[in-house]
Image: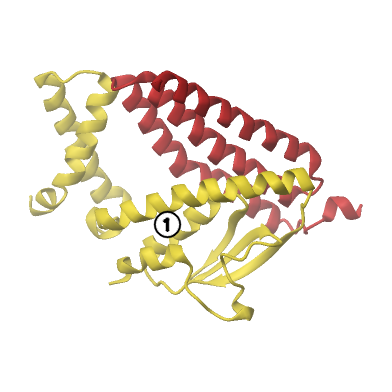
């Protein structure tokens, strides 16, 4: 039952990630793409890691996965912020690509 | 020595991380963990931070718990709403200038972090209490400063850091 829940979470995470990738191709603007890519990073990553933790049970491996999850959740916004900010400071405007 | 006593909770947390990574609860590992945790905190306090470690990262456990719980729920709520945007192809975005009602720098950084972690919003700038947020067109969690000022739910949780 626990394993089923873990696999279910992993499948849900993969669905989230797949939809995020579809969004990356579907959206034409840089800014909307970065908003969607942050969805893959957070929702997909978080769900798949919870799935792995449940699958590992109470072990050192599960605790390591938990630590990695916390570390990524702290550092992930920094990379997204850095990319979006550099584009904004470079004068990249909203809908710049769709206007071309 | 007094500073070290204040940092005792951080030393235990770091020792816990050391033990997890070494996959051992042996006495020698506990000693090594305590030693390296103490050295890293002393080094950070001495060379990397302007303020004391506890002053810079002072956050109450209950505030952290509420913050993480709300953030977790918000991530999934926004993640699901982003799915509909992908399906419908709604890619219109806007940049909001939002002035936070908090003054503590750590609280503002945690707010900016939460905004970026929530799917559909990314913080692209911080100037004092003013945050520039990139969001989808229909995003209304963070009211534009031109549309009247209210504290967002994140700020209601993090406001206790101001005192």
Residue A77, percent from left and from top? 52, 47
Drawn colour of chain B? Answer: yellow
Residue B128 placement, left or right of A26:
left
Residue B82, percent from left and from top? 66, 47
**Residue at the location (80% across, 40% down)?**
A26
Residue A16, percent from left and from top? 62, 35
Is residue A6 positioned above or below B95 on the image?
above
Q: Give the chain letter at badge 1.
A: B
Residue B80 placement, left or right of A97:
left
Is residue B117 positioned above or below B151 on the image?
above
Drawn colour of chain A? Answer: red
Q: Which residue is mark 1?
A: B110
Residue ranking furthest to the front: A1
Q: Nearer the viewer, residue B17 or A43?
A: A43
Residue A18, percent from left and from top? 67, 31
**Residue at the location (37% across, 31% down)?**
A66
**Residue at the location (44% across, 74% down)?**
B101
């Amino acid at each position: 039952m626990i394993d089923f829940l873990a696999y279910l979470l992993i499948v849900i995470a993969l669905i989230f990630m797949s939809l995020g990738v579809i969004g990356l191709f579907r959206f034409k603007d840089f800014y909307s793409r970065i908003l969607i890519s942050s969805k893959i990073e957070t929702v997909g990553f978080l769900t798949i890691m919870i799935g792995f933790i449940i699958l590992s049970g109470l072990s050192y491996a599960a605790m390591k996965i938990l630590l990695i999850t916390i570390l990524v959740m702290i550092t992930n916004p920094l990379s997204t912020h850095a990319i979006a900010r550099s584009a904004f400071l470079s004068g990249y405007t909203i809908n710049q690509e769709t206007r071309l | 020595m007094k500073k070290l006593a204040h940092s005792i909770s951080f030393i235990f947390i770091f020792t816990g991380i050391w033990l997890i990574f070494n996959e051992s609860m042996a006495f020698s590992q506990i000693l090594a963990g305590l030693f390296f945790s103490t050295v890293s905190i002393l080094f950070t306090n001495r060379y990397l931070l302007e303020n004391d470690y506890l002053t810079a990262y002072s956050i109450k456990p209950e505030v952290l718990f509420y913050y993480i719980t709300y953030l977790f729920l918000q991530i999934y709520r926004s993640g699901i709403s982003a799915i509909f945007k992908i399906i419908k192809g709604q890619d219109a975005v806007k940049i909001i200038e939002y002035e936070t009602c908090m003054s503590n720098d750590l609280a503002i950084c945690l707010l900016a972090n939460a905004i970026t972690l929530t799917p559909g919003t990314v913080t692209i700038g911080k100037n004092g209490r003013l945050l520039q947020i990139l969001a989808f067109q229909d995003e209304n969690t963070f009211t534009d400063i031109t549309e009247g000022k209210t504290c967002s739910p994140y700020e209601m949780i993090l406001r206790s850091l101001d005192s």
